[in-house]
Image: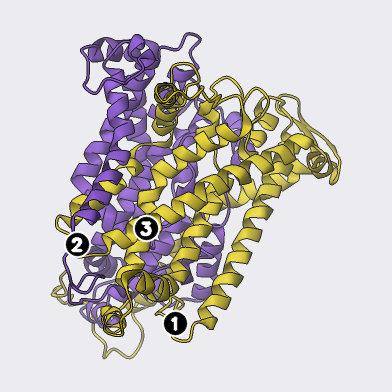
Chain colours: A yellow, B purple
Amino acid sequence: MTTTLSRPDTARPDLPRPTFRQRLQVWDVKASPYLYISPFFIVFAIVGLFPLLFTFYVSVHDWHLLKGQGEFVGLQNFRDVLGDRFFWNSMVNTFSIFLLSAIPQLAVALFLAAVLDQQLRARTFWRMSILLPYVVTPVAVALIFTNMFGEEYGLINNLLGNLGIDPILWKTETLPSHFAIATMVNWRWTGYNALILLAAMQSVPRDIYESAALDGAGPFRRFFSITLPSIRPTMIFVVITSTIGGLQIFSEPRLFDAVTAGGSQRQFQTTVLYLWEMAFQRQNFGEASAVAWLLFLIIVLVGLVNFMISKSIATADTKPRRVRSKR
Amino acid sequence: MQRARAVPGTGIDSGSGKPVRKSRKRGSLVDGRRPGFLTYGILLAFLIGSAYPLWWSAVMGSRSNEALGLDWPPLLPGGNFWTNAAEVFDTVPFWKALGNSILISGTITVSVVLFSTLAGYAFAKLKFRGNGILMVAVIATMAIPTQLGIIPLFMVMQRLGWTGEVGAVIVPSLVTAFGVFFMRQYLVDTIPDELIESARMDGANMIKTFWHVALPAARPAMAILSLFTFMMAWTDFMWPLLVLGSSNPTLQTALSQLQSARYVDYSVVLTGAVLATIPLLILFVLAGKQLISGIMQGAVKG
C-alpha cells in the first residue's frame, strides 16, 4: 500500500475563498460514503426489501400462480395454513430432522475440535480432511446418500444384510427417512462446525490449563470445567446457525425422493418443501406467501431467543471472554 | 443451500471474534505432551468417514449398475467411468450447465466483493450521517431468509420474461448484507485512521484513497469473501431450480435432473455427482487454507 502519492499542485490552502476545486473536495468527502454504500442499498431494495413486502401483500390476497391476483382476503391464508395438518406435519418433520442432525453434529464437532486442539503434526492436513465434505455441494451430497440409503440395493442395507439385519425402509418410514436426511446434513457440516469451535478453543489462554493441570485436574475435568464454559458463546452461535439452516432445509429432502415433494406420504416433507409444493404444484401463491411469513417469524423468534440466551450467558460469566460486542 | 445464507446478525457478538487467537506457547491440552496414537487414530477414522462416501461414489460411478447390488461394495474403481460420463453428457447439458455455473458464480462473486468492499470501507472508516443506523439496517437484513422472497421474485422474473435466463439467478445475489458486514468488521481494525488521513493530506481524493489505502489492506478479506461467495452461488439449488428451466440449467439443477429421469441409472447419477464435485475439489485443494482460516475466523457464519 502506498502513501507516497505525489502532491497535486492544485492544493493551495492559503486562498481566501473556496475555489471550485475545494468545493468539489468538500462535496467529494460528503457524498462519497453514500456513493459507496448505495449499490448495496439500491440492489437490496429491489431484490430484498421489495419481495419481502410484496410477499406480505400476496399473502393477504387470493393469488393463483396462473390466474394472478384475486380478491383481498385478510388473514384467511394464514388461518388456512395454520389449520392445514400438512403444515404442522412439515413443522414436525423439520424439527425432527433438525434435532437428529444438530445434536449428534454438535457433539461430534465438539469432540473433534478438542482432538484437533492439540499440538498435532500436519495440522493443516487434518483440518482440510475434516472440511472435505463441506466442498461437496448439497445436491451431490443428496445424490450420493440417496443412493447409499437405497431401500433395495443401497450400500447401507446391503451391509446390514451381511449382518443379518432386515433392510430398513429409509424412504418409506418416517423416522428412518429423517435419520437418512440428517445424515446428509451431518456429513457435510460437522467438520465445518468443528473448525469454528476449534477457533474458539484456541483463544482460551493456555496458562489456565497449565495451572489446572498443576492443581491435578485431568483432561476430562479440564475439558468440562475450562474448555466448555469458555466457548459457550461460540457454541450458542453454532447452535443458532444450525437451527436457522435446519429450518430452511430444502435440497436434501427434495432430492431424497425426486418425484414427490417430501415422500409419498409426506414422511419427510419439510416446511420449505411444503411452501414449494403450495406455490408451484398447488399453485396457491397466497397461502405459500403466508407460509413464507410464518417461517420468517419462526426464524426471527429463534434469533431473539438466541440473543437473550447469549446475553444472559455473557453477563453470567464472571470473567467473560473478549466478546465481539464493540461495533 | 442451507446454512450459507443464514443469519449471523444475532449471534455475531457471541461468536469468536476475529483477532482473538493469541500467539501462545504451542502447548497441547494434555500437559504439553505430544498427542499420541489415539488422537491420530480418531482423526484417521474421521478422515475415512469424510472421504468414504466420495470414494464410494467414485467407485460406483466407474462401474455398471450391477455393482450396486453386491453385498460387499467393491473397493476399487472399475472401467465404466467414461461410458457413464458419456451417458451423463447425453442426458443433461453438462457443459452448458458448467458454463452457466461458472458465469453465475463468477459474476456474483465479483459484484459482491466489489460492492461489499466499497460499502464496508465506508461503514468502517468514513464519517457520514446515518452511518450507525444504516449499518444496523444492513445487519438486520441478514436475518431475512431467502425463501421469504422467492414468490414475488419469481413473479417479477416471469413478468420481465427472464425465466430460463441466467440473469434471473445473478441479479438477486448481486449484493449480500453478510459481505458488507464482513468487510466492515475486517477493515475497522485493519486500516489505521492515520493512514487515511495522510493519504488525504497528500491530496488524494476519496476514491483514490479507497483505491490505494483500503483496497490493498482489504485484500486478504476479499480473498476469503470471494471464496465463500463463490461457494454459496455455486451450491445454490432452490432458486436456480425454480427460475431456470431444464433447458438452461446450472450444474446443480442439471445434476438433479439425472435423479429425476424416468429410468434412473444409479451409476450414471453417481458419475454425475463425482463430475460436479471436481471443480470445487480443485478449488479446495488450491484455496483450502484460506477457506479454513476464513471459517476459523468465525465471522464467516453465514
Give left or right: position of A10 versus B179.
Answer: left
Q: Which residue is mark 3?
A: A111
For mark 2, what is the residue?
A: B35
Decide if residue A272 is in sight here.
Answer: yes
SS at badge 3: helix
Check if mark 2's residue and mark 1's residue have beta carbons within 8 Å: no
Same chain? Circles 1 and 3: yes
Badge 1 amino acid: Pro
Q: Taking the image as drawn, is residue A36 in sight?
A: no
Q: Is residue A255 above or below residue B147?
A: above
Residue B190 image point, x, y percent: 28, 73
* Foreground tag (2 vs 1): 2
Q: Which residue is mark 1?
A: A320
Q: Residue at x 28, y 55 (%)?
A: B292
Q: Position of residue A194 (x, y in %)?
A: 36, 56
Q: Marks 1 and 3, Cα distance to the nearest angstrom?
A: 23 Å
* Label 1 neighbour load within 10 Å: few <14, some 14-19, many 20+: few
Local SS, label 2: loop
